[in-house]
Image (cartoon, rainbow, N blue to C red):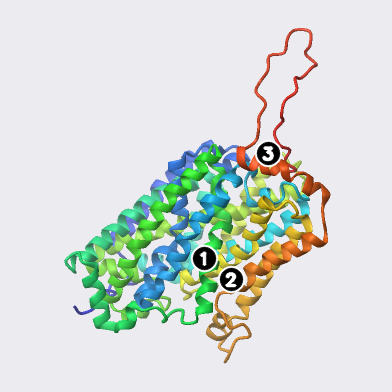
């Protein structure tokens, strides 16, 4: 089979794409209008008032996770690199059992809006929340870069606009979702997007397999015929075993440190629903990654690697170009619009988690010492959302031509290094202290960013230097153990009696939740006496 001439419509206005694009934006803006009428409090803005069911949250989690990196980036990596492109999808998928068994239920029982609520529960608020905000915002920035790059290329493909104009359009629509609809709008946009993406990707995979008698083996054989045996062999994308392990641990543990994923566990009514929602999400995401495998090899065979790289150096347009190859410009338009929905929902979730760090962790808890009025918190949250939306637009313009899956891989390395160690130690170790938490989070954030800057990706590929000071592209194998080690060592050197004493309270609440004293009818004449009970665990906000 000869590569298709797909790509002849790339960069030209596509009527079908424009129709589906406007339809999706119209539907989601209607959702935002509905959600805005229900978003009156900080709890509703950040956590949908805890009223999302387990199944709904499972689809929303999958929607949050099936990002531009998943659909566009992995399909592009598999199309251009073969088998090795799957390292990202495998790494991301195996991170979900970590979330299921270690994170979901304790997080829901201990926190309120952000993962910093859990880390700071028995520690000193100000230093812990400041450090957590550094890690959260760093992860959000790197993740936003990936999404906005994919979005810019997609809208350029849909409308034939310049990349920069496309990024501005995406940023403006996303700001509307978050600014007015908060978590309620974001959740429903993610559910709609997850259904569309799963349906669209499955239809595209079926269309590809129909060209090969519905035999994946025939598809892979054609890839081998065209590109040689190395198309199905590891080593082209990640040849160094140490590099492979480093990337793998970053992807696996990064899932449990992503602020916009962790934030979703506060939207459900209880811990059981949080755990169940992860079960739903894992099944949906696992199926989706199987589909992207077919899409990547299908694009390499039916479109051709040269054509893919010719349109976008990062290979991010492989899936839309494949859609044109198997279904014409109409299918290209539909898949492109679905891809846009994918990015928009993820960017909204990221922006919301960044706004929570700025508003809840920094303004309300640090600046106002937990005494900010509800209206003030909501105002700061919306201002933060606006600022982050503008930042996302700027970053999208600056970092064009980067492969989105790779950029998200770096965000995972920072999340795994800055957030995950402190979160785990705070829940499982009695001796963890405020200084240990601060040292762990700052060490993880700074070391991950520094080693990424010193890596071959930045020094050689971006700056054009002959060599790099740090040999690995992903620093996870160094920065994750370093963050654990520093947190452990500093905690041993700076014991904190109150934190240690409150660990039993944390452990109890982590497993059974807050104990709320039932209402008691007080007999006449004893109105001033309150029967003894177990109060809800105090939360230093």
Residue 378 picture location, percent across and down: 64, 43
Mark before the other along the chain sequence, 1 or 2: 1
Answer yes or no: do the residues labelled 1 and 2 have beta carbons within 8 Å? Answer: yes
Packing grade of label 2 (10 A; few <14, some 14-19, many >=20) is many
Q: Nearer the viewer, mark 3 or mark 2?
A: 2
Packing grade of label 1 (10 A; few <14, some 14-19, many >=20) is many
Packing grade of label 3 (10 A; few <14, some 14-19, many >=20) is few
- Tell me the quarter of the picture where residue 390 sits: bottom right
Residue 188 picture location, percent across and down: 45, 45
Q: What residue is at 47 percent from the left and 39 percent from the top? A: 53
Mark before the other along the chain sequence, 3 or 1: 1
Q: Is residue 189 visible in this depiction of the protein? A: no
State the SS at label 2.
helix
Answer yes or no: do the residues labelled 3 and 1 have beta carbons within 8 Å? Answer: no
Q: What residue is at 49 percent from the left and 74 percent from the top? A: 400
**Label of residue 374 in the image:** 3
Q: Nearer the viewer, mark 3 or mark 1?
A: 1
Which residue is at the front of the view, 179 or 129?
Answer: 129
**Label of residue 251 in the image:** 1
Furthest residue toward top: 524
**Label of residue 476 in the image:** 2
Answer yes or no: do the residues labelled 3 and 2 have beta carbons within 8 Å? Answer: no
Residue 323 picture location, percent across and down: 28, 66
State the SS at label 1.
helix
Left or right: 250 in relation to 213 = right
Distance from disc 1 to disc 2, alpha carbons, whole Å, reads 9 Å
């Amino acid at each position: 089979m000869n590569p298709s001439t797909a790509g002849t419509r790339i960069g030209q206005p596509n009527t079908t794409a424009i129709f589906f694009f406007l339809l999706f934006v119209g539907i989601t803006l209607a959702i935002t209008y509905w959600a805005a009428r229900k978003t009156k409090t900080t709890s509703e803005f950040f956590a949908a008032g805890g009223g999302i069911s387990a199944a709904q949250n499972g689809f929303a989690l999958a929607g949050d996770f099936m990002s531009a990196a998943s659909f566009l980036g992995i399909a592009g990596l598999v199309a251009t690199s073969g088998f090795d492109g799957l390292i990202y999808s495998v790494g991301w998928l195996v991170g979900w059992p970590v979330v299921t068994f270690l994170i979901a239920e304790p997080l829901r029982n201990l926190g309120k809006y952000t993962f910093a609520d859990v880390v700071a529960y028995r520690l000193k608020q100000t230093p812990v929340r400041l450090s957590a905000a550094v890690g959260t915002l760093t992860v959000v920035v790197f993740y936003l870069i990936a999404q906005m790059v994919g979005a810019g290329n997609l809208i350029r493909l849909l409308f034939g606009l310049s990349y920069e104009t496309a990024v501005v359009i995406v940023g403006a629509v996303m700001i509307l979702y978050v600014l007015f609809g908060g978590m309620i709008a974001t959740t429903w946009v993610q559910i709609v997007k997850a259904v569309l993406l799963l349906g669209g990707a499955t239809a595209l995979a079926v269309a590809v397999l129909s060209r090969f008698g519905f035999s994946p083996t025939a598809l892979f054989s054609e890839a081998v015929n065209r590109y040689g045996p190395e198309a199905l062999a590891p080593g082209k994308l990640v040849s160094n075993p140490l590099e492979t392990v480093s990337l793998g641990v970053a992807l696996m543990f990064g899932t449990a440190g992503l602020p916009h994923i962790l934030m979703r566990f506060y939207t459900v009514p209880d811990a059981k629903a949080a755990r169940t929602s992860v079960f739903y999400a894992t099944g949906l995401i696992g199926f989706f990654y199987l589909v992207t495998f077919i899409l990547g090899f299908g694009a390499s065979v039916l479109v051709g690697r040269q054509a893919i790289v010719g349109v976008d150096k990062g290979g991010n347009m492989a899936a839309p170009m494949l859609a044109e190859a198997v279904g014409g410009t109409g299918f290209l338009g539909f898949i492109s619009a679905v891809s846009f929905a994918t990015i928009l929902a993820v960017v909204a979730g990221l922006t919301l988690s960044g706004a929570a760090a700025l508003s809840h962790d920094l303004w309300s808890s640090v600046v106002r010492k937990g005494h900010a009025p509800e209206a003030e918190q909501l105002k700061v949250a919306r201002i933060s959302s606006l600022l982050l939306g503008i930042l996302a637009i700027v970053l999208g313009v600056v970092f064009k031509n980067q492969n989105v899956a790779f950029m998200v891989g770096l965000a995972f390395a920072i999340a795994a290094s800055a957030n995950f160690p402190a979160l785990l130690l705070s829940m499982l170790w009695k001796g963890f202290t405020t200084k240990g938490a601060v040292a762990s989070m700052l060490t993880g954030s700074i070391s991950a960013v520094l080693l990424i800057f010193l890596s071959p990706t930045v020094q050689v590929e971006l700056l054009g230097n002959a060599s790099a000071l740090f040999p690995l592209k992903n620093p996870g194998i160094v920065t994750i153990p370093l963050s654990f080690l520093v947190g452990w060592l500093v905690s041993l050197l700076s014991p904190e009696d109150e934190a240690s004493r409150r660990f039993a309270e944390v452990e109890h609440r982590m497993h059974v939740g807050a104990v709320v004293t039932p209402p008691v009818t007080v007999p006449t004449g004893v109105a001033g006496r309150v029967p003894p009970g177990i109060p809800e665990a105090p939360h230093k906000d």
